[in-house]
Image (cartoon, rainbow, N blue to C red):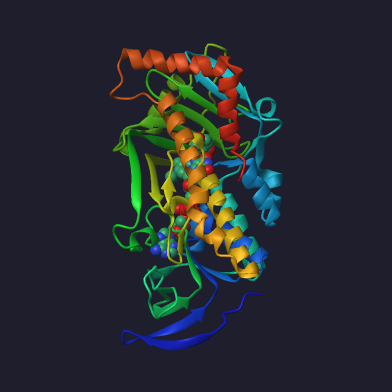
Amino acid sequence: MVTFATRSVQVFEGIAQRSMRTKVGIIGAGPAGLVLSHLLHLQGIESVVLETRSRQYCEERVRAGVLEQGTVDLLNEIGAGARMMREGMVHYGVNLRFSGRTHHIDFRELTGGRGIMIYAQHEVIKDLVKARLASGGQILFEVEDVSIRDFGETKSSGKPTILFRKDGEAQQLVCDFIAGCDGSHGICRSSIPEGIITSFERTYPFAWLGILAEAPPSSEELIYSYHDRGFALLSMRSPQISRLYLQCKPDEDLNEWPDERIWQELHTRLTSTEGWTLTEGRIIQKGVTGMRSAVIEPMQYGKLFIAGDAAHIVPPTGAKGLNLAVADVRVLARAFSEYYSAGRQNPLEAYSITCLRRVWKVQRFSWWMTSLLHRWESENAFDHRRQLAELDYLTSSRAASQTLAENYVGLPME
Ligand code: RFL
Ligand code: PHB
């Protein structure tokens, strides 16, 4: 059972605040924040998660679908993996399709038996929230006006504090540390004073139009297709639900994409000369996702540790965002554990450097997959031929296929 060490009313800048105390204040109930709260709980370290959205919103937000084996193992370790193991779909490869032909990349054979799990991110969130609440965890949904103070490196009288409102009441959470797991639009990263962090960014001149459809997946494993008209991806959520994506313009207007046009374009871009057909179904969700690569360095300032999408964004082509978020908090939880159990500061001090090594390798992979599989406005006939040659090499060389496979299933944890 997690307890607030103290609950009192204090006055800050003239406003009465209900005051609570915990060891690690976690901002954001996405995969990073929730997995961190589980890992800390397993080490006996108290935390509180604050989330601006409602529980229902977090549990229904359609996002990622591919979990690396390391992520699957971790969800099992923290006791939130039972439903995933029953309902998720284990895949041991993906297909690359170009010039009308399909090439299978066999993960099992190329990586010594490793695979991936297809299980929707919002299902992971449901499982993490349920398990954390069942173990007595504190997740406060629908908090407002979140801000942080006294976390910096300069000497201040106070302890790191998160200020917020819950049900209209001003509250504060005083912590030893703050974990900024609040995604790409959160407040943690932007609370760091100017000049401390450097941001490395790249945008892409395209986006993805994604749909969920009530249609049995037309392939047992994912199909990444490079076509003259642009990229397309066939993925899935269950034996009844397909998830499909089309490369589109960043400012694409969904009104210009009635269902018939989406299916027509998917048929064209996923076409194959091998007698394969795409099964259509009722479209139940549509959306446009922008493509961006971004990293901040360092991922820490004073007692504020930034993790997941708050620290880095990858384009979705490599299916890495959620997995990278989980990898960050695994490092962070271990560092907190060393600090609380043995008083060791070094792992916390090394948090950013440790994470960034993996972050940049995953950035490289996601950028490479994106560059390889999309049509670029700026490309000329030479670039197009070169991309086809790279795909041909990738699917005919064991060394090249193995590089793709070992990155896709997930690089080993340090
Ligand atoms: P999240 O999931 O954005 O969670 C952050 C949470 O913080 C809350 N928040 C705040 N809470 C309190 N106070 C504030 N001031 C707050 N501001 C924000 C937000 O409401 C939210 O609940 O970040 P996190 O935990 O770092 O997790 C990152 C992943 O969600 C993300 O990287 C993935 O979804 C990316 N991604 C994929 N990743 C994969 O590993 N495999 C995939 O197959 C995959 N496919 C995808 C994707 C992302 C996509 N979209 C929509 C961006 C496919 C798509 C289409
Ligand atoms: C998904 O199923 O949503 C998905 C799969 C693979 C990707 C990106 C997204 O690369």
Q: Nearer the viewer, residue 211 or 368?
A: 368
Q: Exactly how many numbered labels are in the figure? A: 0
In the rendered image of this protein, does residue 174 appear above or below residue 208? below
Percent from the top left, x then y, of residue 30?
Answer: 50, 56
Q: Nearer the viewer, residue 60 or 198?
A: 198
Q: Nearer the viewer, residue 328 or 28?
A: 328
Res. 215 in view: no
Residue visible at 42% across and 88% down? 10
In the rendered image of this protein, does residue 381 appear above or below residue 197? above
Residue visible at 42% across and 38% down? 315
Residue visible at 33% across and 58% down? 196
Q: Horizontal placement of 218 versus 193: left or right?
A: right
Res. 121 in view: yes
Percent from the top left, x then y, of residue 224?
Answer: 50, 26
Percent from the top left, x then y, of residue 162?
Answer: 43, 72
Residue visible at 33% across and 25% down? 376
The image quadrant of residue 208 is top left
In the rendered image of this protein, does residue 390 appear above or below residue 320? above
Quarter of the picture containing the N terminus is bottom right
